[in-house]
Image (cartoon, helix red, strand yellow):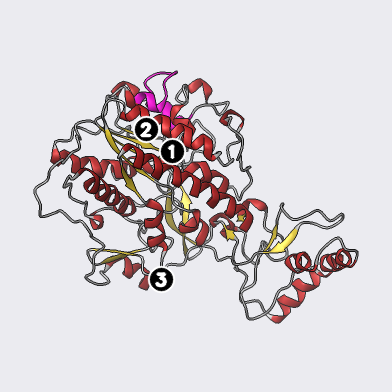
């Protein structure tokens, strides 16, 4: 990833307060704690990596301890809630030594004079802790909505074929069980369900390499990076909530944040090529002269409209921020010419592009960025359309069942705004590394970020069920760790 220069001023901003205002509506810290109309005796949490406490691109024990369900459960215990057990990883590094692609957590290290996130080697082989269950935190990193009901998703024999998830293999009650079945078997009195992020996130983090599966109602045919059809999403969510509430359990649902609110898609500016000299501009424009000439010929022959010609023309200018040259698979085919254009303010360049956006390798200048590094305007639209449909479903089901509802999307947009969020005088934002809420992978939260989310759940629970669970102290949890 790109070397991240962190100034002493930026670091100091993480350590000192910025004022006395607190984003602290519905604070009940001075009120007697009560359960209201809810019953917190057996609380189970269902979801994906965000529910598990995943952060810094790994699941590790310290992160799990600071998962938002664990924070909520601690507050529920003050109102008669029962024990809340999590399938803790065997170490504080994460990863699986016997599975490819599962490295340990990212750490900030000084590399060539700058701070950069560097992955740790995996610390241990895949273990199995099912015998110490059942577990109330059923968050499974990587799970999509339809995976919660998939029998055999925790069967180790299915790992090589991609039919199982190692994080669920660790604690599944049997080789044929499903996550939702493991939840129902505990007869929960209260549940939280935050699922659906991965239904669009894997498509987004792949740079739109997958396919929008709108109209395809068979998830068995989906690729790993495909967008889940909203009808499939609605069907499985409705079935989960119906099963969870069948015996009178109450609960809380949360919606899905837009990808435009997280650092993985906002850290790198959409117009990232700046500071070019006149000589560099001349060299680059000369290098694309033949390509631009081919576009002009295509326009003259009527193959391209003027608007398409202007969109695909490669031109660098000194003294301004220029778009990066990218390969856009959605451009029309012109025989003999690649599908190149420059990014605009409506494209999202992924955090992973940081490693190739530099003069040494020429990424985005003399070499086009690969599709996997950019979520184009069209691809972003696919993601937001699906996200909006998912969120409408979640709100509709919550309202129909009388469940609490967390508008996590609005909260994340607030966090990514210019003013951020203040808690007890400390300002938090979605700024990568220095904002305090997002971990080093740019997608998952820090302990403090999860605490902010835990408080949103607690507020929603209190509003809906007339309980008085106290909020957690955001500032007491961990943020990004500096070397």
Q: What residue is shown with label 2?
A: 241
Image: 441 above or below 83: below
Indicate yes or no whether the magenta region holds residue 343: no
> Within the magenta stretch, is there residue 177?
yes
**Residue lying farthest to the right in this orientation:** 301
Q: Residues within 10 Å of mark 1 (few under 14, many from 20)?
A: many
Element class at badge 2: helix
Residue 7 is tagged as: 3
Of residues 185 and 396, the one drawn nearer to the viewer in this rendering: 396
Does residue 103 appear in this view? yes
Q: Residue at image x 41%, y 59%?
A: 413
Badge nearest the viewer, 3 or 1: 1
Measuring from the top left, give residue 371's x and y in whole percent. Answer: 66, 52
Tell me residue 148's x, y (percent).
43, 30
Q: Nearer the viewer, mark 1 or mark 2?
A: 2
Separation of disc 2 and disc 3 at Cα? 47 Å
Task: Give how far apart the Cα atoms at labels 1 and 2 are.
Answer: 20 Å
> Which of the two labelled residues, at mark 3 and mark 1, occupies the earlier sequence position?
3
């Amino acid at each position: 990833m790109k070397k991240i220069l962190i100034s002493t001023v930026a670091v100091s901003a993480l350590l000192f307060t910025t004022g006395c205002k607190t984003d602290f509506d519905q604070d009940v810290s001075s009120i007697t704690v009560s359960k209201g109309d809810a019953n917190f005796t057996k609380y189970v949490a269902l979801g994906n990596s965000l529910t598990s406490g995943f952060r810094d691109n790994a699941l590790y024990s310290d992160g799990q301890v600071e998962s938002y369900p664990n924070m909520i459960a601690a507050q529920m215990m003050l109102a008669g809630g029962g024990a809340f057990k999590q399938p803790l990883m065997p170490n504080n590094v994460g990863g699986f030594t016997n599975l490819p692609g599962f490295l340990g957590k990212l750490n900030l290290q000084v590399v060539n004079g700058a701070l950069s996130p560097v992955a740790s080697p995996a610390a241990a082989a895949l273990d199995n802790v099912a015998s110490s269950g059942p577990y109330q935190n059923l968050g499974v990193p990587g799970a999509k909505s339809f995976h919660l009901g998939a029998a055999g998703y925790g069967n180790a024999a299915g790992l090589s074929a991609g039919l199982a998830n190692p994080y669920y293999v660790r604690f599944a009650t049997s080789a044929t069980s499903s996550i939702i079945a493991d939840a129902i078997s505990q007869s929960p009195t209260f549940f939280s369900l935050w699922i659906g992020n991965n239904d669009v996130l894997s498509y987004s983090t792949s740079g739109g390499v997958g396919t929008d599966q709108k109209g395809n109602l068979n998830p068995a045919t989906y690729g790993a990076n495909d967008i889940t059809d909203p009808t499939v999403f609605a069907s499985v969510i409705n079935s989960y909530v119906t099963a969870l509430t069948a015996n009178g359990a109450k609960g809380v649902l949360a919606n899905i944040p837009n990808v435009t609110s997280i650092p993985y898609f906002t850290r790198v500016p959409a117009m990232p090529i700046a500071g070019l000299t006149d000589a560099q501009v001349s060299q680059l424009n000369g290098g694309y002269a033949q390509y631009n000439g081919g576009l002009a010929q295509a326009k003259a022959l009527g193959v391209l409209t003027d608007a398409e010609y202007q969109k695909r023309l490669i031109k660098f200018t000194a003294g301004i921020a220029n778009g990066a040259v990218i390969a856009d698979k959605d451009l029309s085919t012109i025989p003999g010419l690649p599908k190149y254009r420059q990014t605009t303010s409506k494209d999202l360049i992924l955090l992973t592009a940081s490693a190739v956006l530099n003069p040494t390798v020429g990424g985005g200048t003399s070499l086009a960025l690969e599709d996997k590094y950019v979520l184009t305007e069209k691809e972003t639209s696919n993601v937001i359309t699906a996200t909006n449909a998912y969120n409408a479903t979640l709100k509709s089901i919550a309202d129909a069942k009388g469940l609490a509802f967390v508008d996590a999307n609005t909260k994340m947009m607030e966090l990514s705004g210019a003013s951020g969020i203040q808690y007890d005088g400390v300002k938090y934002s979605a700024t990568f590394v220095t904002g305090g809420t997002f971990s080093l992978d740019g997608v998952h939260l820090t302990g403090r970020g999860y605490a902010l989310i835990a408080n949103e759940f607690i507020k929603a629970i209190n509003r809906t069920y007339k309980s008085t669970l106290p909020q957690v102290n955001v500032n007491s949890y961990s943020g990004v760790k500096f070397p």
